[in-house]
Image (cartoon, coloured by chain):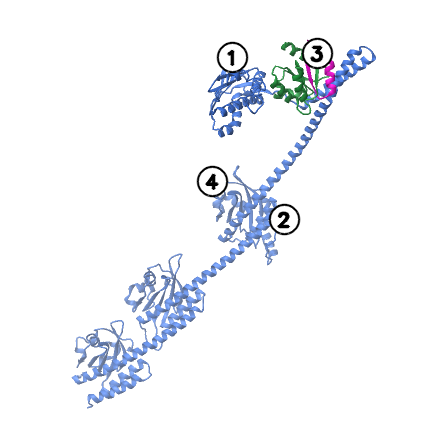
Chain colours: A blue, B green
C-alpha cells in the first residue's frame, strides 16, 4: 500500500504540473480528476464548483460519470451529500452512500452503480468554493487518513482553481475590454442611427455571448418602448414590439433605470409572459443618456463557444452589458443629435427654398399694379410645379355686405387630359421664379380656359355661419376640407369636382379680401400640411399685394374723377374770370358814360330844339341805353342781394357759438344756454343774422376781457305779445358807462383800441332791415343783456 | 345862404359835371380830387353835405366815410359810385344815402335835397 504522503506528493506534483500548463481551465480540471482517481485508485472522482453569485453547485469535471452531465448537473447548496458538504464545509464519508438520508440520486450522471462516497469541501481563503468527491463501486470505509489526504488535495486544488479562475477572469476582462474597444470603435464609426443600433445589438450579443439581443428606444411622442434593433432572434409573431413603461421586463428596467438579471426564465412568471418563453435567461439594462432613460438593451440565452449546454448570465455579463450600454447610450444620443441636426438642416433648406420662392414671387407681384395681372400671378404661383404645385387654384372675392364669394379667376387644367398635356410639356423644365413674371399670352390662355369660365360663374353664399367659407373669413385661417360633400354640401362639391381641398384666406390689414381654394384634383394627392404652411405664408403677401392693387385701382378711379372735376372747375373758373373781366370793363366804361350822358343832358337842355340840341339828346339817350345794358350786365355778374329764407334762430345761435367754442375755452369763459325747446323759425338772411350775433359776441367778449367776467348766458325765446323771436346774450363784462350807452349804435363810435366801432351799429341795422330791433339792458358794474328781436309768426313754415 | 356841397371824386370831368349841375341847383359847390383833400376841405369849407365816390386812388370812399364820420357824425354823406354792389358792404351803412352814378343826375339831386331838408 502506498503511503498517503507519497501519494499526496505524487498527486500534488501532477496537479501542479497540470495547473501550470497553458491548457484551458476545464481541461485542467478534467486532468486533475483523472490523476486523483488513478493515483487514489478510486472509480469516480468529480469536482463541483460553487457558482459565485448563487447558491448552486455545478458539475465541472468528472471521471467515472456520464460525460454528458458535465456543466449540466446542478445542485443547490445542501442538496445531496455533495451539497451538504458544501453547505456545512465538512467532509462526508459514507460506506454506502445510498443509505444516508442526505443522499440524492442524480440519474443522468449514472452514479447509481457506485456505493461508497467521500466528499470533501474545496476551501480557499476559508470559503467553500466547491466539493471534490470520490466514489467506488464497492462499499468502502474511508479512514481518517484518507479523508485528510483528500482534504489536503482538495485544498491544493482550491488554490489552483482560484488561480485559474483569476486567470480566466483576467482573460475575460481583457476579452471584454477589447470587445468594448471594438464596440466603441464600431459605434463611433457611424452616425446613422439605425445602423448604429443594429451594431450595438450585434456586438452586445457577440461580446457577451448571447443568442439574441433586443434593443428598444423610448418614443418620446408616444412614451412607448419600441424595438429599434434586434440580433439573432427570429421575428416572433407573438412578441409584442411596443411596451408601455413599466410593462414587462424591459418596461420595468426603463421605468426604474436599473439593470435586471434573470437566470432561469422558468422561475420568473413575468418573463415567461413577456417573451413567450423563447429564452431561458436574460439580462436587461437601461440605456441612459444625460440622466434620462432613453431605452433598454436585453440579451437572451447565454451561449459560450466551445461549451456545451446553456448557461445563465452572470453578474459579470450584466456589468459588461451595463458598460456597453453606457457607451451605446452616448453613441445613440450623438446619433440622435446628428439626426436632429440633419433634420433641422433639411428643414432649414426647405425654409430657405420657401423663402426664396416667396421672395421671387413677391418680386413678380411687385412688378404690376394691375389687379387682373396680379391675380394671375398669385394663382400661377400656387399651381406651378416648382411653385406650390397644387393642381388647381381658384380665387373668390369676399363681399362682406352680401356675404357672398364671387369667383374671380381659376388657374389649372380643365381636364385630366389637359393636365397630362401641361405636365408633359413642363416635364423636366422647372421654372426659375427669379425675374419671373406672367406673360400676356399665358394670361390669355388662363382666362380663356373652361376652368376659369366655370370659376367666374360661381357665386357662393357664406351666410350660413357654420360653413367652411364663413369660418375661413371669420377666423382668418386656412381650413382643409377632407370630404367636400359632407362639409360643404353636394352643390359646391359638384361645382368644385373634388372631394378634398383647402380654403385659404388672403388678408390685408386684418381684413379678409378674398378666399383661395386649392386642390389636387388630378394627382389626387392629399393637400399636405407643409404645402398649406407655405401657402398661408404666401397668402399674407398675396393679400397685401392685392390690397395695394385694389387701392391703386381705386386711386386711379379717384384720380380720373378728380381730373374731370378739375377740368369742369377750370371751365367754370374761366367763365367766372370772363364775367369778372366783363364787370370790370363795364365799371370802367360806366364813369365816362356817366360824364358823357351828364353833359349831353346839359347840352340838350341848354341848346333847345336846334340841331345841337337834337344831337345832344341823341347822345343822352344812347348813353342812357348803354347805362341800362351795363346795369344788367353788372346785376348779372354780382348777385349780392340778401337771401331771405326761413331760418331757425336756435341753429344760427348754435352755429355761431361753435365758431367761438375754442376762443371761449382758451379764455376760460363759461357758457350757459337756455334755448327755446322747438325750432324758432323766422324769415331772415342767415349770414346777416350770424354777423349781427358775432358783433354782439365780440363786444361782450371784449368787455369781459377788460372786466374779468367769466360767464356768458344765451337764451332764445318768444315774446308772444310783441310777435318777436328773441336772441338774448347776457355778459358779465361790467356793463356800459352811461356816457357811452347813448352812442353804442352810432357808426364809428368806439371805445376800443381796435375795431371800427361799426359792430353794434351793424347789428342794429341788420335787425332793422329784418323789421326788428335790438334792445339793450345795461346793469352798470355787472353786465349787459342784448336782445336781438325779430318778427315772428307762430306756425310759420319750418325751414 | 346857399347850402354847401363837397363833391369828392377822382375824375375831373365827373367833378365838372357835378359842379355844373349842382351850381345850377343853387348850391355852393366845392370839389376834392381824393380822400386827403376831402378831409382837409371839410374843415375849411364846412359843407352841409358830401358826395363821396368809393373807388379812388389812395384812401377809398369807405375809409374817407369813416374818418369824416368820426370827425363829425352829423355831417350827411352820400355815397356816389358807379358800383351798385357796395350797397351791401357794411362799411357804407354809416352813410346817409347811396346813389349809383348815372348820366341822369336827378336821383342825386333829389337825395341831396331830401337830406338837406331833413337836416334843416
Q: Mark 2 lies on which chain?
A: A
Can you identify the residue that label 3 sits on? B27
Q: In whole angstroms, how far apart are the C-alphas of marks 4 and 3?
A: 95 Å
Please tell me whether residue A410 belongs to the stretch shown in magenta.
Answer: no
What segment carries the magenta color?
Answer: B1-28
Q: Toward the viewer: A732 or A82?
A: A732
Pointer 4 and pointer 3: residues touching (CB < 8 Å)? Answer: no
Query: Residue A308 falls in which quadrant of the image?
Result: bottom left
Q: Is residue A42 above or below residue A251?
A: below
Look at the numbered disc 1 and give the secondary structure of its residue.
loop
If you read the primary sequence from the N terminus, does the residue marked by circle 2 or circle 4 appear first? 2
Q: Residue at x 32, y 75 (%)?
A: A309
Q: In whole angstroms, how far apart are the C-alphas of marks 2 and 1?
A: 84 Å
- Residue B81 in the image: x percent, y percent? 68, 19
Look at the numbered disc 2 and give the secondary structure of its residue.
helix
Can you identify the residue that label 1 sits on? A722
Mark identifier at residue A445: 2
Amino acid at each position: 500500500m502506498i503511503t498517503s504522503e507519497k501519494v499526496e506528493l505524487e498527486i500534488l506534483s501532477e496537479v501542479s504540473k497540470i495547473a501550470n500548463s497553458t491548457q484551458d481551465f476545464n481541461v485542467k480540471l478534467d486532468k486533475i480528476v483523472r490523476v486523483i482517481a488513478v493515483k487514489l485508485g478510486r472509480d469516480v472522482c468529480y469536482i463541483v464548483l460553487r457558482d459565485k453569485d448563487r447558491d448552486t453547485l455545478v458539475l465541472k469535471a468528472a471521471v467515472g460519470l456520464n460525460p454528458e452531465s458535465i456543466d449540466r448537473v446542478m445542485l443547490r447548496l445542501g442538496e445531496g451529500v455533495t451539497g451538504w458538504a458544501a453547505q456545512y464545509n465538512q467532509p462526508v464519508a459514507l460506506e454506502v452512500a445510498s443509505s444516508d438520508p442526505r443522499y440524492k440520486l442524480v440519474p443522468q450522471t449514472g452514479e447509481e452503480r457506485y456505493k461508497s462516497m467521500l466528499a470533501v469541501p474545496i476551501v480557499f481563503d476559508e470559503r467553500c468554493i466547491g466539493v471534490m468527491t470520490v466514489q467506488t463501486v464497492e462499499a468502502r470505509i474511508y479512514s481518517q487518513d484518507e479523508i485528510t489526504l483528500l482534504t489536503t488535495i482538495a485544498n491544493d486544488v482550491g488554490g489552483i482553481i482560484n488561480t485559474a479562475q483569476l486567470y480566466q477572469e483576467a482573460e475575460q476582462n481583457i476579452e471584454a475590454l477589447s470587445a468594448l474597444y471594438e464596440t466603441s470603435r464600431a459605434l463611433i464609426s457611424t452616425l446613422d442611427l439605425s445602423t448604429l443600433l443594429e451594431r450595438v445589438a450585434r456586438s452586445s450579443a457577440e461580446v457577451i455571448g448571447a443568442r439574441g439581443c433586443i434593443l428598444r428606444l423610448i418614443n418620446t411622442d408616444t412614451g412607448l418602448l419600441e424595438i429599434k434593433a434586434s440580433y439573432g432572434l427570429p421575428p416572433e409573431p407573438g412578441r409584442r414590439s411596443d411596451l408601455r413603461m413599466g410593462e414587462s421586463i424591459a418596461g420595468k428596467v426603463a421605468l426604474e433605470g436599473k439593470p435586471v438579471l434573470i437566470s432561469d426564465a422558468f422561475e420568473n412568471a413575468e418573463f415567461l409572459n413577456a417573451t413567450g418563453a423563447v429564452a431561458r435567461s436574460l439580462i436587461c439594462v437601461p440605456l441612459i443618456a444625460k440622466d434620462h432613460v432613453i431605452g433598454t438593451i436585453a440579451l437572451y440565452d447565454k451561449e459560450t463557444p466551445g461549451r456545451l449546454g446553456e448557461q445563465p448570465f452572470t453578474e459579470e455579463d450584466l456589468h459588461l452589458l451595463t458598460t456597453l450600454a453606457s457607451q451605446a447610450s452616448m453613441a445613440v444620443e450623438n446619433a440622435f443629435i446628428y439626426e436632429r441636426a440633419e433634420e433641422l438642416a433639411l428643414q432649414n433648406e426647405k425654409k430657405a427654398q420657401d423663402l426664396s420662392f416667396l421672395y421671387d414671387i413677391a418680386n413678380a407681384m411687385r412688378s404690376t399694379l394691375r389687379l387682373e395681372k396680379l391675380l394671375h400671378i398669385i394663382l400661377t404661383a400656387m399651381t406651378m410645379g416648382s411653385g406650390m404645385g397644387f393642381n388647381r387654384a381658384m380665387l373668390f372675392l369676399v363681399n362682406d355686405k352680401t356675404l357672398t364669394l364671387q369667383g374671380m379667376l381659376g388657374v389649372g387644367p380643365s381636364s385630366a387630359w389637359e393636365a397630362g398635356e401641361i405636365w408633359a410639356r413642363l416635364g423636366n423644365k422647372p421654372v426659375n421664379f427669379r425675374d419671373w413674371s406672367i406673360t400676356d399670352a399665358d394670361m390669355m390662355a388662363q382666362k380663356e380656359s373652361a376652368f376659369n369660365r366655370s370659376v367666374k360663374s360661381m357665386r357662393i353664399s357664406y351666410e350660413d355661419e357654420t360653413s367652411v367659407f364663413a369660418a375661413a373669413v371669420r377666423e382668418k385661417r386656412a381650413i382643409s376640407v377632407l370630404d367636400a360633400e359632407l362639409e360643404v354640401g353636394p352643390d359646391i362639391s359638384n361645382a368644385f369636382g373634388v372631394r378634398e381641398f383647402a380654403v385659404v384666406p388672403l388678408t390685408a390689414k386684418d381684413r379678409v379680401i378674398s378666399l383661395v381654394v386649392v386642390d389636387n384634383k388630378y394627382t389626387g394627392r392629399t393637400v399636405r400640411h407643409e404645402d398649406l404652411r407655405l401657402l398661408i405664408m404666401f397668402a399674407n403677401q398675396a393679400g397685401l399685394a392685392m390690397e395695394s392693387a385694389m387701392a391703386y385701382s381705386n386711386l386711379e378711379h379717384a384720380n380720373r374723377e378728380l381730373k374731370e372735376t378739375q377740368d369742369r372747375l377750370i371751365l367754370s373758373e374761366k367763365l367766372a374770370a370772363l364775367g369778372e373781366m366783363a364787370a370790370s370793363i363795364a365799371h370802367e366804361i360806366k364813369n365816362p358814360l356817366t360824364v358823357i350822358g351828364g353833359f349831353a343832358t346839359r347840352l340838350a337842355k341848354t341848346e333847345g330844339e336846334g340841331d345841337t340840341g337834337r344831337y345832344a339828346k341823341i347822345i343822352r339817350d344812347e348813353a342812357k341805353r348803354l347805362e341800362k345794358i351795363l346795369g344788367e350786365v353788372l346785376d348779372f355778374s354780382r348777385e349780392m342781394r340778401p337771401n331771405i329764407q326761413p331760418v331757425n334762430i336756435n341753429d344760427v345761435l348754435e352755429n355761431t357759438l361753435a365758431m367761438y367754442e375754442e376762443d371761449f375755452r382758451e379764455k376760460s369763459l363759461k357758457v350757459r344756454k337756455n334755448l327755446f325747446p322747438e325750432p324758432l323759425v323766422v324769415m331772415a338772411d342767415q349770414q346777416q343774422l350770424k354777423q349781427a350775433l358775432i358783433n354782439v359776441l365780440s363786444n361782450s367778449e371784449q368787455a369781459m376781457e377788460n372786466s374779468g367776467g367769466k360767464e356768458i348766458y344765451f337764451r332764445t325765446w318768444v315774446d308772444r305779445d310783441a310777435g318777436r323771436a328773441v336772441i338774448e346774450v347776457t355778459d358779465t363784462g361790467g356793463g356800459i358807462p352811461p356816457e357811452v350807452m347813448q352812442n353804442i349804435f352810432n357808426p364809428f363810435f368806439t371805445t376800443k383800441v381796435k375795431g371800427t366801432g361799426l359792430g353794434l351799429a351793424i347789428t342794429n341795422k341788420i335787425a332793422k332791415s329784418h323789421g326788428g330791433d335790438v334792445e339793450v339792458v345795461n346793469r352798470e358794474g355787472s353786465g349787459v343783456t342784448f336782445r336781438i328781436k325779430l318778427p315772428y309768426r307762430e306756425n310759420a313754415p319750418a325751414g | 345862404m346857399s347850402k354847401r356841397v363837397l363833391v369828392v371824386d377822382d375824375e375831373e370831368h365827373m367833378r365838372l359835371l357835378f359842379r355844373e349841375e349842382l351850381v345850377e341847383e343853387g348850391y355852393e359847390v366845392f370839389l376834392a380830387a381824393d380822400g386827403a383833400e376831402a378831409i382837409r376841405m371839410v374843415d375849411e369849407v364846412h359843407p352841409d353835405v358830401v358826395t363821396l365816390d368809393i373807388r379812388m386812388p389812395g384812401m377809398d370812399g369807405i375809409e374817407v366815410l369813416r374818418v369824416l364820420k368820426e370827425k363829425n357824425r352829423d355831417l350827411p354823406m352820400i355815397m356816389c359810385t358807379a358800383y351798385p354792389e357796395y350797397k351791401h358792404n357794411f362799411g357804407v351803412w354809416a352813410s346817409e344815402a347811396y346813389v349809383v352814378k348815372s348820366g341822369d343826375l336827378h336821383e342825386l339831386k333829389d337825395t341831396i335835397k331830401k337830406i338837406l331838408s331833413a337836416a334843416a
